[in-house]
Amino acid sequence: MKIAVAKGDGIGPEIMDAVLGIFKAADVPLEYEFVDMGKWVFDKGFSNGMTPEAQQTIESLGFLFKGPMETPKGKGVKSINVTARKTWNTYANKRVFRTLHGVDTVFSKAGIPIDITIVRENIEDTYGGIEHMLTHDVALSRRFITRPGSEQVIRYAFEMALKKEAKRITCGHKANIMKLTDGLFLEVFYEVAKEYPSLKADDVIVDDLCMKLVTRPDVFDVVVLTNLQGDIVSDLCAGLVGGLGFAPSANIGDHICIFEAVHGTAPDITGKNIANPTALLLSGITMLRHLGLMESAVTIENALLYTLETGVHTGDFGDKNIPSVNTTQFSDAIIANFGKVPQLNARHALPNKPITPTVFNLKHNPMLESVEAHADTIVGVDFFVASNEQPNAVAEKMLLHTGDLFKLVTISNRGTQVWPKGSIFTNLINQYRCRCESIGDAPLTQTDILELYKKVMGSFKVCSLELLNMWDGKKGYSLAQGQ
Ligand code: NAD
């Protein structure tokens, strides 16, 4: 079996060489095709951070094992790490956080075991990076949460939970505030849960989840979250087990999977041969399991756990009374411990069951769409207009334009209603949202909206607009705070 390998920048080549050295010593039956990705590829003028040959190789092999990569600052280019995850639709980011014997934390000292798997949605949310300045004072980020995108990652999380014989699967969310976006994610979670009756499925609001994770991490098993919340919560979990140096990461898609460490390129220690390769090695072990190379995965993981238990450590962790070793000595110690079994969390031998890599010959970009057709009707429009006037003055101007078709329902500022009712204590910024709905909820056309737009722009600069849709009789938009 052949996989693509990108060594990465900074400490990337040092830790990748250490990990591939361990794989070689364990006779891992893999071949590697090294591909060009990272900072130096950006510097050569490839604006997405990879050469066309690298893209072609990764797309034909389907598996990428990568070291950390640097995104050049101030050049307006997007992170290669995020580009790779999004381009190849690796929709589920799986990160496993387990107590490691020899890596002291407050929980290990208190005898509280941790074994949490975070599944983070990897494509959507604010990570679309779709941002605009609407006025000099107002920046807008669009947060997309989609039904098919949520379903892909949530279904993956349930399948994975079933395989690992998890007892509980929890959805972390903020649906109490973001009723439509997080509300959709939560709705899909419970829809999918019905197909997995053997798993206890529940949900926790994300702030409460953070509090509970740092007080009782042992009660959680698999947790699935949207992208940004998942990003934050997974780093919090990394802290529970000793930091990013012990946090593997797998980005799973239907066609391409990427395995990487979550830490960065560590420029401060680059070239010194002192970096800790554990996170990349754990990511590599996750990859071996994914590829069905169970025997090698077990041998290497047990040797790593045994090595950590015996107190061998690089300079960034471990008992300061025991001298640290460098990257090469650390990987040599792991190789010397092949066949040894750790006291805690020993993995049991399993036979290899190599997967057969699928050859994908896609002719079109896959379109993800809900199967059911839904009737939608336009019943209004939200205009986001620039103005530094008081709410009543904005309303007076808007009311000049609403005519026979529309009524002005509410005006809000930063989401808080300021007209027809509001509070004098609400601070304003120089942009209002003016909601115009059709009289008697009559269906509107896009031309009706355009005609109103033409009139409104006579009084204001319209920064943006959003249609108000009804889906099967349900409002497809939220109310203003205080409306
Ligand atoms: P960083 O993770 O590189 O470093 C933070 C601190 O952790 C540093 O003190 C570093 O020495 C230490 N550290 C990190 N990995 C270590 C290891 N394996 N062993 C020992 N110590 C380690 O974070 P940063 O400094 O914020 O970012 C540096 C660069 O990495 C940036 O260009 C950033 O864009 C990039 N980055 C890449 C990825 C990725 O490829 N997935 C992730 C994060 C950051």
Image (tube, rainbow, N blue to C red):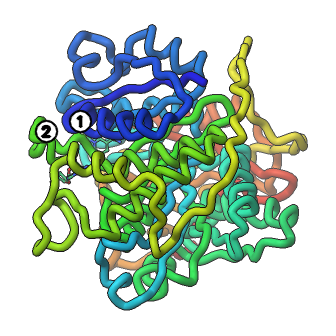
Q: Where the N terminus falls, by quadrant?
A: top right
Residue located 42% across and 56% down the image: 303
Q: How far separated are the C-alphas under marks 1 and 2?
A: 8 Å
Give the numbered dot on residue 152: none
Q: Where the C terminus falls, by quadrant?
A: bottom right
Q: Please rate how many residues cluster around mark 2, counting C-alpha atoms within 10 Å: few if below 14, some from 14 to 19, many from 20.
A: some
Tell which circle, 1 or 2, labels the residue nearer the N-terminal end.
1
Q: Quadrant of residue 414?
A: bottom left
Mark 1 residue type: Glu
Q: Nearer the viewer, residue 228 or 481?
A: 228
Lateral position of residue 260 relative to residue 448, left or right: left
The spot of residue 370 in percent (x, y) is 82, 42
- Find disc 1 in the rendering and name its residue: 14
Lateral position of residue 473 relative to residue 349, left or right: right
Give the numbered dot on residue 270: 2
Residue located 53% across and 67% down the image: 346
Mark 2 residue type: Thr
Q: Does the residue labelled 2 lie within 8 Å of ligand 1?
A: no
The spot of residue 324 in percent (x, y) is 14, 60
Residue located 11% across and 35% down the image: 271
The spot of residue 371 in percent (x, y) is 88, 40
Seen in the picture, residue 136 relative to 237 is either above or below; the reply is above
Q: Do the residues labelled 1 and 2 touch (CB within 8 Å)?
A: yes
The kind of secondary structure element at disc 2 is: loop
Q: Nearer the viewer, residue 283 or 101?
A: 101
Lateral position of residue 288 relative to residue 396, left or right: right
Decide if residue 47 is in sight here: yes
